[in-house]
Amino acid sequence: MPPAIWAARAVAVRFTRPAPPGISERYRPARSVAPGEAFRVGGQLTALPRATIDLLDPAGRVTDSATPEANGHFTLTGTARAAGTTAFTLRVRDGQRVVEQAAVPLLVSDSAAPRLLILAAAPGPEVKYLRRWATDAGFTVTTQMSAGGGIALGDPAIAINGATLRRFDLAIVDDRSWAAQRGVLTGAAREGLGLVLRPSGPIDGATRAQWRALGFGIGGGDFAPIALPKVAAPALSSTRLGIGSTDAPVDIATPDDLLPDVSRLPLAPAAQAPTLLQDASDASLAQWRAIGTGRIALFAGVDSYALTLTGHRALHNDWWNALLRTVIRPASGVQQSGLIGWANERLTLCGLPAPTPVERPDGRRSTLLPVQGCAAFWPDSAGWHRTGTGQSFYIYPAQALPAMRAARDRAAMLALRPPTANDRAGGSAPGPSWPFALAWLIASALLWLLERSRRGRQSAM
């Protein structure tokens, strides 16, 4: 009898019916997001090929909607609002029937306003709208522009040196400002400053070579138009953008054939600089790389401000949010735990250096006693929990997400399966052993015959 059968005789076996169709996997942001920042949530559906997945904000409004791919995977986008712990909702519909709903817990961290420096060699609409967007997004913005003849525009002039740049978390620099301050900007990036380079128009050969030397895959061709996605449905655009403003209302309706004139530098794949942004045709729009303790990104787009005037303000927000949040100077902050747990089930919390209190949603507290940094916790209620170390995690109701729960249990059961011969051989089945035994027998017989023969005895003498 196989060892697995003998092991199963010593435990109680209970049959559980297969989980109904629904969400079998879900991926949410592993870190906290800032107010106004876009985030992505994804997952996989099981046995629902024609379903529709909606992402609802905390007010119950649909902020994004999609259909799953052939393998069931889906990705949706939402926008965080006020700081604190909140929960969006995933809703799975099969036609008009709601199959399943699940919370998407989100930690929105309202940290100190990041300090942004915008350097431009000349004033223009790109700088104007970029400053306006950054201010609305919660950045503390300082702008330095040159009008020629030694005249500076923008905020009060500052000296661009290492000591000054240490006071900033980010800098957005156009190609001509880069040429004038290349050494000090590179040194500041090595010390942690987040740096975003952008072309203001056609760039010269020297700047092109310098940006290539940083690891970016700049091609030698001319500017090409950016392929833009179709304008989202008015209801979804209104939900994502919020209230809006007088000069940029959210209810603006733009036909798909009235697209802004936004172009880009050609970017080729680069080994040192992975792609950060792509347009609707999958062409690379931005690349980034680490340098010292900081990061540098190259945004290939030109005149991205036109997006805000033609119904693509959400895309403009997403692009610049992704750029700045990727390269921002590293800072310590509260991180959202990637734990997924259910009420009345054991959960393991790690990274606890000492006895740590846990606060439940109703305010009750328990103290965890870790062993080698980990402790067991049995939550008895659903909702947000918080540890004394600043770690926040969400517990689902006991009956929520049955398909995901079944997939988790199945993976845990397969992990207990003893390795087979195929596993040990890397998946390849071993061949028969009798040819090796026959070869050994023949070789032994030949050696014995040689030893007993006359030639063998003469050699021994």
Image: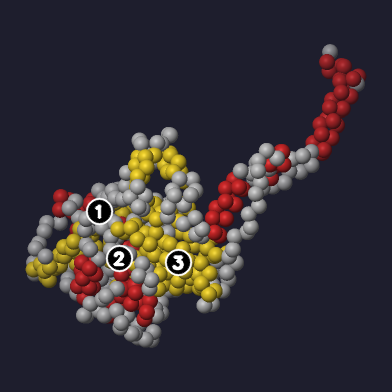
Residue 267 tag number = none
Which numbered marker is on residue 81? Answer: 2
Tell me if residue 15 comes above or below residue 226 in the rendering: above
Alpha carbon separation for disc pair 3 and 2: 17 Å
Choose top left, top right, bottom left or bottom right for residue 200. bottom left
Q: Residue at x 72, y 38 (%)?
A: 6
Residue at left 57%, top 69%? 48
- How far apart marks 1 and 3 lie (CA) works out to 37 Å
Which of the two discs, 1 and 2, labels the residue nearer the N terminus?
Answer: 2
- Under mark 3, the amino acid is Leu
* Mark linked to residue 90: 3
Residue 113, above or below 61: above
> x, y (%) of residue 75?
46, 66
Locate the C terminus and report the quarter of the image it occupies.
top right
The local secondary structure at tag 2 comes to loop
Amino acid residing under circle 2:
Arg
Q: In this view, does 258 lie to the left or right of 23?
A: left
Label 2 neighbour load within 10 Å: few <14, some 14-19, many 20+: some
Q: Nearer the viewer, residue 376 or 236?
A: 376
Question: With 24 as the anchor, is 209 left or right in this view?
Answer: left
Circle nearer the viewer, 1 or 3: 3
| Residue 379 in the image, given as x and y percentages of width and height | 44, 48
Which type of secondary structure does the marked residue at label 3 adopt?
strand
Where in the figure is residue 102, as x and y percent of width and height? 46, 63
Residue that carries the numbered disc 1 in the rendered image? 193
Q: Residue at x 72, y 41 (%)?
A: 5
Residue contact at pointers 3 and 2, CB within 8 angstroms: no
